[in-house]
Each structure stands twice: as C-alpha cells, then as structure tokens.
Amino acid sequence: MTRTSTPPAPPSTPPPPAAPAPTPEQAGSVPVEGGPCHESEARSFATAANGTSLVCVYMGAGGGFRWSQHAENDGSVHNIGDPCDLAVDRVAQDPSGKAIMCGGDTWVGGP
C-alpha cells in the first residue's frame, strides 16, 4: 500500500495590526468659531485656540452643526425644564455637562 503525503500548510501570516483608537482630540472637530462640528458634539462646550468659549449648535438644514460663541456661562448646573430668569440667566450646563440656555422662564436644550 502506497502512502501519499500531504504537503505542509503554508505558514500563516498574522493579521495587520489594528489602527489605534482615535484620541478625544482626533474624534472631535477643531473648535473654531463658525467652523463645522459633529452632531455628536451638539451642545458641547469647547475653547478656540484664541481663548474664545464656544458651543456646538445646529444652525439648520443649510448650516449644519457649527461652533458658535455663546453668552457667559457661570458654570451653574440645571436640568432642562427647571425655572430660569431671562433677566439674569443665559447659559448653563445640564448634569451631563451639555450646554443649556434660558428660554424665557425655563432651561432648554438650545436652538
């Protein structure tokens, strides 16, 4: 009886290394007043290179999401729907750190 030998399998090559995960700076946009930002950054605060405090807002279908200067944020934390006084309240943040604004008599998520 003749024995047939099977040729050895070619050596396996390891898969290429996975691309590194993006850092937060790479994942987001560059905050420049009037520049584009991502929907995932909506209502997020940022600071431009010149020190201007910005927030990512939706400018409508023709404008998309853009970095915009905002009224002074005193750092206070409120929930959407909480009462506010437009005479003194302008911009604050919700418990998750997202920008909210005084919409007359209650805090709202923004334009």
Image: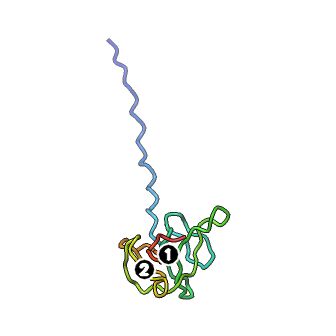
The x, y position of residue 103, in whole percent, is 50, 75
- First in sequence: mark 2 or mark 1? 2
| Disc 2 + disc 1, Cβ < 8 Å | yes
Circle 2: is it few (<14), some (14-19), or many (20+) Cα within 10 Å? Answer: some
Report which residue position mark 2 lands on. Answer: 84
The x, y position of residue 49, in whole percent, is 55, 84
- The colour scheme applied to this rendered structure is rainbow
- For this orientation, the residue located farthest to the left is 1
Task: Please state which of residues 97 and 35 is positioned toward the viewer in this rendering.
Answer: 97
Circle 1: is it few (<14), some (14-19), or many (20+) Cα within 10 Å? Answer: many
Quadrant in the picture for the N terminus: top left
- Quadrant for residue 5, please give it: top left
Quadrant in the picture for the C terminus: bottom right
* Residue at disc 2, secondary structure: loop
Q: Residue at x 44, y 74 (%)?
A: 107
The kind of residue on which mark 2 rests is Cys
The kind of residue on which mark 1 rests is Gly
Task: Please state which of residues 88 and 33 is positioned toward the viewer in this rendering.
Answer: 88
- Mark drawn on residue 32: none
Asked whether, in this view, residue 78 is left or right of residue 99, the answer is left
* Residue at disc 1, secondary structure: loop
The x, y position of residue 7, in whole percent, is 40, 29
Considering only vertical position in the picture, is 104 above or below 72? above
- For this orientation, the residue located farthest to the right is 62
Task: Please state which of residues 61 and 18 is positioned toward the viewer in this rendering.
Answer: 61
- For this orientation, the residue located farthest to the front is 105
- Give me the C-alpha separation between circle 2 and circle 1: 8 Å
Asked whether, in this view, residue 47 is left or right of residue 2, the answer is right
- Mark drawn on residue 103: 1
The x, y position of residue 10, in whole percent, is 42, 38
Considering only vertical position in the picture, is 16 above or below 4? below
Considering only vertical position in the picture, is 106 above or below 50? above
